[in-house]
Amino acid sequence: QVQLVESGGGLVQAGGSLRLSCAASGRTGYAMGWFRQAPGKAREFVAVIRWSSGTTYYADSVKGRVTISRDNAKNAVYLQMNSLEPEDTAVYYCAGRFSDYRSVYDVTRINGYDYWGQGTQVTVSS
């Protein structure tokens, strides 16, 4: 059984930065992703990274402002977020996928993941 624990969320002013962490225990699989869910909105894809190669892919809405990284030795994945905007306010979730993927479409969907963390709140004030 895999458990994911997110941390690093909080309140930050617009233009600020935050680094989210996701600690994984157990068998982690091939890829880890970050999603977010704003109040009243659907959960949306943010970024994904392959454990083995470090290959990344980002949503257009965060490209250039967000960096996903991983530390295989620590079984941890990070999301560095810069130039934060009020529109980035959401609960951020990390998720894991046991199988590899051929298309980014597979990892930008919620049902492309096998296990999820509980989420961490990010609030960006204007």
Image: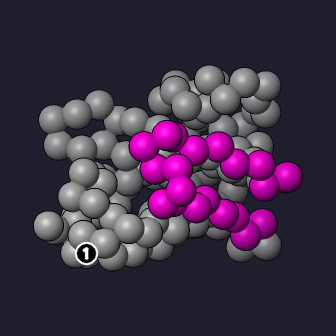
Taking 117 as reference, is 58 left or right? right
Which residue occupies the foreground of this view, 28 or 112?
112
Residue closer to the observer: 91 or 25: 91
Q: In which quarter of the image is residue 26?
A: bottom right
Residue in the image at 47% along x and 73% along y = 19
- Residue 7 in view (yes/no): no
Regarding residue 32, the answer to whether it shows in the image is yes
Q: Is mark 1 on a helix, strand or loop?
A: strand
Count up the numbered dots. 1
Q: Which residue is drawn at 40% across and 73% down?
A: 18
What residue is shown at x 79% (from left), y 73% (from top)? 73
Q: Is residue 52 left or right of residue 87?
A: right
Q: Which residue lies furthest to the right in this view?
A: 53
Quadrant location, the C terminus = bottom left
Please, is residue 17 above or below residue 6 in the view?
below
Which amino acid does the dot numbered 1 rest on?
Val
Q: Residue 68 occupies which quadrant of the picture?
A: bottom right
Residue 13, compared with residue 3, is above or below; it is below
Q: What stretch is highlighted in magenta?
A: 52-72
Q: Where is residue 16 in the image (x, y as percent from the top left)?
A: 33, 76
Dot 1, how many residues are within 10 Å of its Cα: few (below 14), some (14-19), or many (20+)? some
Q: Is residue 73 left or right of residue 104?
A: right
Mark 1, residue position: 12
Q: Which residue is drawn at 58% across and 61% down?
A: 67
Q: Which colour scheme is used?
A: one colour
User: Quick check: 2 above or below 76?
Assistant: above
Verify whether residue 44 appears in magenta.
no
